[in-house]
Image (cartoon, rainbow, N blue to C red):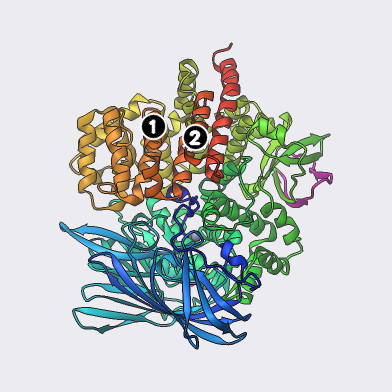
Amino acid sequence: MGAILFIVIAMLAAFLPRNCEELKSPVKATNSSQEDIIPSVSRRLPENIQPIHYDLQIDARLSDWTFNGLVTILVKVKKSTNRIILHSVNQTIKSVAVTGHKEATFTVDQTLQQLKIELNSKLETSKTYNLTIEYESVISSGLDGFYQSTFTDKGKKFRLATTQMEPNGARRAFPCFDEPAFKATFTISIIHDKKYTAISNMPGTTASLKHNREKTTFSKTVKMSTYLVAFVVFENFGFVQTTTGKHNNISVRVYAPSFEVNKTHFALNTTREIIKHYEKLFGIEFPLPKSDMIAIPDFSAGAMENWGLITYRRTAILYDEKTSSGRDKQWVSIVIAHELAHQWFGNLVTMKWWNDLWLNEGFASFVEFLGSDAVNPELRTLEQFYTETQSGALQADALANSHPIDVQVNDGAEIGELFDSISYNKGSSILYMLYTAMTPKKFKKGLGQYLKDFAYSNAETKDLWGKLENTTNIPVAKMMNTWVKKKGFPVVMVKKIGDRKLSLTQERFFVSQNERRKYKDDDYTWIIPITYKTNIDKGMQLMYPKKDFTINLQKGTEWYKVNVNQTGFYRVNYDDAGWNSIINLLERNHTSLNPSDRAGLISDSFELSRAGLEKISRFLNLTKYLKKEKSYVPWKIATLNLNYVTSMLKDNPEIYAALTNHTRELIKDTLKSLRSNSKTSEENHLKKSLNATLISTALAMGDNETIQEALDNYRKNRNSTSNIDSSIRGLVYSIYVKTGCRAEWEEIFDKFKKEKDPTEIRRLLLSLTDTKDAELLKKLLKMSIESKIIRKQDGYMVVKEILQTHAGHDLAWNFIKRNWKTIVKTWSDKAYSRIFKASASLKSNEYDLQEMKFFVQSILGNKPRPRAVKQSLEEVERNIEWKKRIKRELSELFLKL
Ligand SMILES: [Zn+2]
């Protein structure tokens, strides 16, 4: 599913078990001697019936948001049985028939989401049968299955109906064998009013019916999993088109509501070039005759890789030079590269079961950087891998409540929880580490073989390791098992022995000292591809658990940096001599290390101080060199850390003042040089990103000059805000709201209500959360769950943003507590990851922790805690522990106590 970080960190799905619905029909008493008795209590389907082909007809009535369905599934019997079990949710089943059987009775188990069909005689082994089901249902008002969406153009409201099947929405649209290993072909037809157009995974032809109706029938698909089925019914859309592929015979179309088709050209060009690039990279041609992309006005995640019909949130596909910033453009480029990578990795070769979800998502989250870099090199995406992906994964995986990449999952709720930073970002980080250790050439060769050998089939993690291992002398499976089977990652301690030797040891990294003590006897060790660089040479060696590991230094070595380019998924700590040589180097000549290395050193020194393995003074000493830093990537990491530490200590006025002063001083010169348009090492996109990052930090640190400048900028351009540079426009709106009163907020709110462009809508909406007026915040919170003025897809962003402001945190938290039932109903199980994690960010005292625990107990009782809840509570504990220590250290430093 669609991508990643920023917006999509928010997409991290953590589903509540869908077992709160009442059992509508009793499960029939069955003969316990039958071989398939177990599935009546299992969410997994028995394997004795295999679907081969689906003929699916949907008669969609958008006028009243209902539909009728008729599905005929050709099944093959692997083991004789008189029972068929498949998935179905929220459907009224009208009739069930199986060829050759006069009597077929059925029951629906809403808890297990299963339709159980009993036959009066057995289905015979190796024979095929047609199973036909007639049913009715509603086009859902949620954001999965077959669901509703609307948009307004020139004052008129238009309806569309679209699908989101991953991970288990297909069973909401039609009865099916809804597990990824049950691959089959599909012939889909949609009946709709003449004014609508229907599109699906394959090209379609339309025939007229009576009563102003039409039937669009689509060609038979290739063999694929149910979660990749898609169809969209719409009116008043337009498209742009081109062709691509080795033979230039694959049609590419990008669809959008008519009024914004002019924003689809960047997506069209990117798609055309990325498909060509991937055909070469994977050595396999794109297998479908077309690849459609469509902007959907209401969309839960970032995008969805449905084979041949990729669906997108509008901000992830539309790009308008006048409105969107370079970072918006980068986002579009990355999301498209991600979804197209899935067309091979995920769609052509699919994970056997959801425990290997990371194979899909980790891979696409890594290859998106290669794809985006290849076709839009000016965006320099791969250079930003550390800030965009890896640093977030390292943070998430430092929690005791993290999970291994490869994890056992049984049901719908657990599947949803897996769409998180570990599957996406740690998954992609360890693949990047392997790619570097093996060399890109060997990695690509093994990958191509894997895709060829498992095409139109399913695979497990070990299958990928096997194919990669054939191309290299690295023990891939043995090494990678230490990274995917365990949670967490190591910190590597580097000690200098004598003049010419480094001794390295490893232990699991915890950001909390309490957790480290708790787990100290656990045998957590990794096979680590150690890379190093000195002023003389560089190298790579595998570090095995429990074996002495040394690096020999050449004569004349002045400094050494372990984890070159930060491609390894580990942190590094040095002894005093090591850190001092690096700090000297940064002060003398920081560009002898590349931006990712500099970012990695900043990040490691900060996180080591949080973990109690180093003092915060190390981080503050190391970051002194930033006065000369002109690159985005190290600044991004440094400002994130500085913002975090100041935000945590806001309740201590003396330290807070000292820290904000310190940060303002640090960023002053670079910000000034950007203002005067003098040269930096980076041009355009990253230079603007750096400028926006520093302005944002200056505003957060209360820098009066920057605040005044932003306000002047707004006042000068309030009637034509497109004159404000798009990279800082959001910040300008925020500070206008933050420093203003009700009138200023209403002014931005009016703009928000009138705005049509999705990127600008997002900017305006988020800036509204910066008001300090409690009444306005209450109004905003109320709108966020009403799904009227604020779209259902955006509401959680508002709650999340307010939770993360000092002015609004308590108010938003109380609102959540009062409205929890509505919140869960609105964002379903995703509410836990979306809301709880944001709640934890500013909570840092014992009262907050106990109060949060009390609330969790009141809503969940004795039910198991979703992982996001456990992680959030751990975050708060970690904040408390760290804050006590850091206060002491900073008092000594700044207040000379
Ligand atoms: Zn994905």
Question: Can you give x and y, in whole percent of width and height, for residue 43 in the image?
Answer: 56, 62
The residue beneath circle 1 is 814
Q: Nearer the viewer, residue 646 or 681?
A: 646
Q: Is residue 641 left or right of residue 320?
A: right
**Looking at the rendering, in which quadrant would you find the C terminus?**
top right
Mark 2 nearby-residue class (10 Å; few <14, some 14–19, many ≥20): many
Give the quarter of the image for residue 300: bottom left
Kindly report which numbered mark, 1 or 2, lies closer to the viewer in this rendering.
Answer: 1
Element marked by disc 2: helix
Q: Is residue 543 magenta?
A: yes
State which region is magenta: 536-558
Instruction: State whether residue 115 is above or below residue 851.
Output: below
The residue beneath circle 2 is 840
Query: What residue is shown at x 69% (from left), y 60% (from top)?
Result: 438
Query: What residue is shown at x 25% (from left), y 32% (from top)?
Result: 712
Tell me if residue 848 can be seen: yes
Query: What residue is shown at x 57% (from left), y 54% (from top)?
Result: 423
What amino acid is at disc 1? Asn
Q: Is residue 893 magenta?
A: no
What amino acid is at disc 2? Ala
Give the quarter of the image for residue 803: top left
Q: Is residue 817 left or right of residue 406?
A: left
Q: Nearer the viewer, residue 292 or 731?
A: 292
Q: Is residue 542 left or right of residue 828?
A: right
Question: Which numbered disc flags the more N-terminal residue, 1 or 2?
Answer: 1
Question: Can you give x and y, in whole percent of width and height, for residue 265 in the image?
Answer: 33, 64
